[in-house]
Image (cartoon, rainbow, N blue to C red):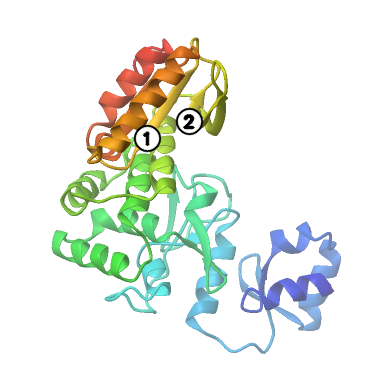
């Protein structure tokens, strides 16, 4: 049982039945720990080390463990864990889990999501919690516009997220018809004017837009060769397309420097001479006209319109 208690130390002195059995502990040994008083039942299939002091954080962890694999603190609870202004620790605990992934019973504050991938959950104070971006998107349809704007600004000011990571989250979730997408689109359109994303934010957004359209993802940061020498590293490459298609992503709506324009034009000539097709897209197009980009991409790839 040593590994069980080591795990409990990292989880506010709590473990779930699934975790105990996953460590290879027989049910009979678990039952013996409960009968002896070393473990006590906190919730159904959630056990705590006897004698540990109660706390709100421990209650949240218990609810997360009780919800089953893939669950995380969410909504108002997630905002409170991250100390977002206006959200307080206490009251109903909100936990989200993937839809029908667990057979564990429903409880007040338990939400099931058709789309809750692993990367939307991250540990905060050792508690699995929805990311700041996902938390805001989940709260969007539940908050008045003025409060939503305040929360949005507070999250950005606290460096809990960026406009870039918000746009990536929107691209991931909006295609799936999430409740509240309209409110977030209006907010991002208003606040995002002139935003220059980092290279990784732009690439993450481009990948999310392609994935949401149901298109097989291209190779990322692929090095391609030219007629006489390697051309360099490309943002994205559809190497299965004929001819191979290179996607070039630009963080700004327009290039301002002649040297950059000339460099891009030369790169295009080198790629064309080597037998590659090219499609360029920028941040503004991906956030404001993603459907137009996908239509052009499908045409280049010889696919039916998504």
Quadrant housing the C terminus = top left
How far apart, in angstroms, are the residues tagged by discs 1 and 2?
8 Å
In the rendering, at what x and y percent does residue 12 appear?
61, 78
Secondary element under disc 2, as helix, strand or loop, is: strand
Q: Quadrant of residue 303?
A: top left
The answer to whether residue 184 is left or right of residue 95 is: left
Quadrant housing the N terminus = bottom right
- Depth order, front residue of 180/59: 180
Label ID, residue 100: none
Along the polypeptide, which appears first: circle 1 or circle 2? 2
In contact (CB < 8 Å): disc 1 and disc 2: yes
- Depth order, front residue of 305/9: 305
Question: What residue is at 50 percent from the left and 14 percent from the top?
Answer: 274
In the rendering, at what x and y percent does residue 91 appear?
37, 76
In the rendering, at what x and y percent does residue 153 appear?
24, 65
Estimate how packed mark 1 is, as few (under 14), some (14 to 19) or many (20 or more) residues with alpha carbons within 10 Å.
some
Give the total number of marks visible in the rendering: 2
Question: What residue is at 47 percent from the left and 16 percent from the top?
Answer: 276
Label ID, residue 249: 1
Estimate how packed mark 2 is, as few (under 14), some (14 to 19) or many (20 or more) residues with alpha carbons within 10 Å.
many
In the rendering, at what x and y percent does residue 37 appear?
76, 83
Question: What residue is at 26 percent from the left and 45 percent from the top?
Answer: 181
The residue identified by callout 2 is 236
Question: What residue is at 22 percent from the left and 45 percent from the top?
Answer: 185
Secondary element under disc 1, as helix, strand or loop, is: strand
């Amino acid at each position: 049982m040593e590994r069980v208690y080591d795990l409990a130390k990292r989880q506010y002195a709590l473990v779930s039945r699934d975790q105990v059995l996953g460590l290879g502990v027989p049910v009979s040994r678990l039952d013996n720990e409960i009968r002896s008083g070393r473990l006590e039942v906190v919730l159904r299939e959630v056990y705590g080390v006897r004698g540990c002091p109660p706390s709100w954080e421990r209650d949240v962890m218990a609810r997360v463990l009780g919800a089953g694999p893939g669950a995380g603190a969410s909504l108002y609870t997630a905002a409170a864990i991250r100390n977002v202004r206006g959200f307080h620790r206490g009251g109903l605990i909100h936990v989200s889990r993937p839809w029908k992934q667990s057979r564990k019973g429903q409880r007040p504050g338990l939400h099931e999501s058709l789309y809750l991938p692993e990367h939307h959950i991250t540990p905060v104070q050792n508690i699995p919690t929805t990311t700041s971006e996902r938390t805001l998107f989940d709260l969007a349809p539940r908050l008045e516009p003025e409060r939503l704007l305040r929360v949005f600004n507070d999250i950005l000011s606290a460096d809990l997220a960026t406009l870039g990571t918000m746009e990536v989250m929107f691209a991931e979730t909006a295609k799936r018809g999430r409740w509240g997408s309209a409110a977030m689109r209006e907010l991002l359109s208003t606040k995002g004017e002139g935003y220059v994303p980092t290279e990784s934010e732009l690439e993450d957004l481009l990948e999310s837009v392609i994935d949401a359209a149901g298109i097989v993802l291209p190779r990322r940061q692929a090095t391609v060769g030219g007629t006489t020498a390697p051309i360099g590293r490309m943002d994205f490459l559809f190497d299965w397309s004929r001819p191979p298609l290179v996607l070039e992503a630009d963080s700004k709506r327009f290039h301002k420097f002649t040297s950059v324009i000339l460099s891009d034009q030369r790169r295009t000539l080198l790629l064309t001479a080597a037998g590659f097709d090219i499609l360029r897209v920028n941040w503004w197009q991906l956030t404001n006209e993603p459907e137009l980009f996908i239509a052009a991409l499908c045409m280049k790839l010889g696919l039916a319109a998504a």
